């Protein structure tokens, strides 16, 4: 849902009137639209040498469970003691019963507890922290929230979910990501937004240049903490958390609870409630196999054959570098496939358009570097194809987890010599 152009000018003045805006910031309202300007920016992931992965690890049958016990929620969304506007928007979205992570995390969050949520990607984590945050912002004029995500794409997806839940609230927000126009971000921050959503590197940039003062932010969410640590953001995260208000409510969401994450939790959270609804690795319902090919000519012909197969639907193809991704996408376009590419060398506008067309099935193939594996949430991807092997086995698991979402069986094929 679009935003109003009327902006919040002070800490306790919330407008709910119309208008339109195309800037990176905006209000949660019914009118206007939001666009992204070109710009540069990227991740701070350190460079590693590629790990050898035995090809046998790329072969695995999907685990198909015929009898999955249905989760019976304790609450309905109507039961939650949240602001009436949020409750109305939830009803309009057709939400009745919360997912397990929502059902178990929201009640604790609404009474001010710190929450650590352990859950698979695609289980409704965004609403689990968004509803309590928005409820508090609507009831406490001076409350402010920071939401950190590992990638630009995930930050945008969080913003879209917040926008629909907070429709008509007049709450103003800023999105701080690489590849989006810095001038617009600076202008949005001058309006003292209630919510700031961004990636660690860009948020740190704004803190260091003095354009973002976090001392009044009393709510913090780290989404996909494990991915952020994998990408080398641990020092940036510690720096950001040190700049927040001393008295704050924290939400950490992750697919794992590794020692490094536990250390972060012990340092920055106060007696958190741990909610774990993880049901196993996302890749368990993905049928995995290898494709043997000798040389680039045979490789592209086999890829062509796979993509032409009637069982192959929406497909995510991974290649190693920005240049190789562009070259492969161009080759597939020339062969008649509806394809685009996404990688860190593209502007945010280009990445956003490609992902939008992929979600809307205007493209059936998206060629990507690993940046996409940490930000794409498209429910109907049938196939993930590793045209080149990933840097690590963890990267492989995360890549193929893009297929087989929402209880479906997915397919993963990895090319090997």
Image (cartoon, helix red, strand yellow):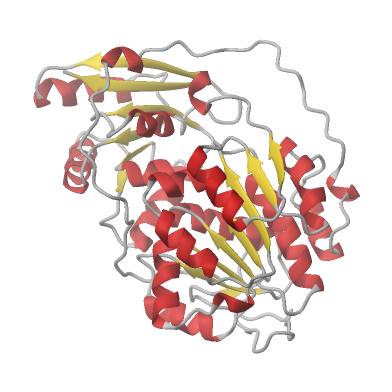
Vertical comparison of 314 with 182: above or below:
above
The answer to whether residue 360 is seen in the rendering is no
Count up the numbered dots.
Answer: 0
**Quarter of the figure with the C terminus:** top left
Please name whichever residue, 232 or 288, is drawn nearer the observer in this view of the structure. 232
Q: Position of residue 139 (x, y in %)?
A: 82, 72
Choose top left, top right, bottom left or bottom right for residue 244: bottom right
Q: Position of residue 414 (x, y in %)?
A: 29, 22
Please name whichever residue, 117 or 149, is drawn nearer the observer in this view of the structure. 117
339 left or right, relative to 74: left
Vertical comparison of 282 with 215: above or below:
above
Q: Residue at x 45, y 82 (%)?
A: 186
Q: Residue at x 45, y 76 (%)?
A: 207
Q: Residue at x 51, y 37 (%)?
A: 258
Please name whichever residue, 94 or 394, is drawn nearer the observer in this view of the structure. 394
Q: Position of residue 408 (x, y in %)?
A: 56, 23
Q: Residue at x 34, y 19 (%)?
A: 309
Q: Position of residue 136 (x, y in %)?
A: 77, 67
**Quarter of the figure with the N terminus:** bottom right
Vertical comparison of 290 with 142: above or below:
above
Q: Residue furthest bottom?
A: 9
The answer to whether residue 3 is seen in the rendering is yes
141 left or right, relative to 180: right
């Amino acid at each position: 849902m679009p935003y109003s152009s009327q902006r919040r000018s002070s800490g306790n003045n919330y407008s709910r009137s119309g208008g339109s805006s195309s800037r990176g910031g905006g209000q949660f309202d019914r009118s206007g639209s939001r666009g992204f300007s070109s710009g540069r920016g990227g991740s701070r992931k350190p460079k590693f040498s590629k790990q050898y992965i035995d090809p046998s690890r790329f072969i695995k049958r999907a685990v198909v469970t015929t009898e999955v016990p249905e989760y019976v929620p304790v609450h309905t969304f109507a039961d939650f003691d949240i602001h009436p506007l949020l409750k109305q928007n939830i009803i309009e979205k057709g939400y009745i019963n919360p997912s397990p992570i929502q059902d178990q995390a929201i009640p604790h969050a609404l009474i001010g507890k710190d929450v650590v949520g352990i859950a698979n990607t695609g289980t409704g984590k965004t609403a689990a922290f968004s509803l309590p945050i928005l409820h508090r912002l609507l009831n406490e004029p001076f409350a402010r929230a920071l939401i950190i995500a590992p990638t630009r794409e995930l930050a945008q997806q969080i913003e879209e979910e917040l926008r629909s839940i907070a429709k008509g609230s007049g709450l103003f927000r800023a999105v701080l990501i690489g590849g989006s126009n810095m001038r617009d971000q600076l202008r949005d921050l001058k309006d003292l937004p209630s919510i700031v959503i961004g990636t660690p590197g860009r948020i740190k940039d704004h803190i260091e240049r003095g354009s973002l003062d976090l001392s009044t932010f009393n709510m913090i969410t780290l989404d996909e903490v494990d991915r952020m640590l994998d990408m080398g953001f641990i020092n940036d995260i510690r720096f950001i958390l040190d700049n927040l208000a001393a008295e704050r409510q924290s939400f950490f969401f992750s697919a794992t609870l590794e020692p490094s994450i536990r250390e972060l939790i012990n340092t920055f959270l106060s007696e958190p409630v741990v909610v774990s609804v993880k049901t196993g690795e996302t890749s368990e319902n993905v049928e995995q196999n290898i494709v043997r090919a000798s040389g680039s000519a045979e490789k592209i012909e086999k890829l062509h054959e796979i993509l032409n197969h009637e069982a192959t639907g929406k497909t995510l193809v991974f290649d190693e570098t920005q240049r190789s991704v562009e070259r492969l996408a161009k080759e597939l376009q020339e062969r008649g496939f509806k394809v685009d590419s996404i990688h860190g060398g593209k502007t945010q506008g280009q990445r956003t358009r490609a992902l939008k067309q992929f979600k809307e099935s205007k493209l059936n193939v998206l060629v990507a570097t690993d940046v996409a594996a940490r930000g794409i949430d498209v429910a109907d991807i049938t196939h993930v194809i590793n045209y080149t092997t990933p840097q690590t086995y963890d990267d492989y698991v995360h890549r193929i987890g893009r297929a087989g979402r929402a209880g479906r069986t997915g397919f993963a094929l990895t090319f090997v010599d």
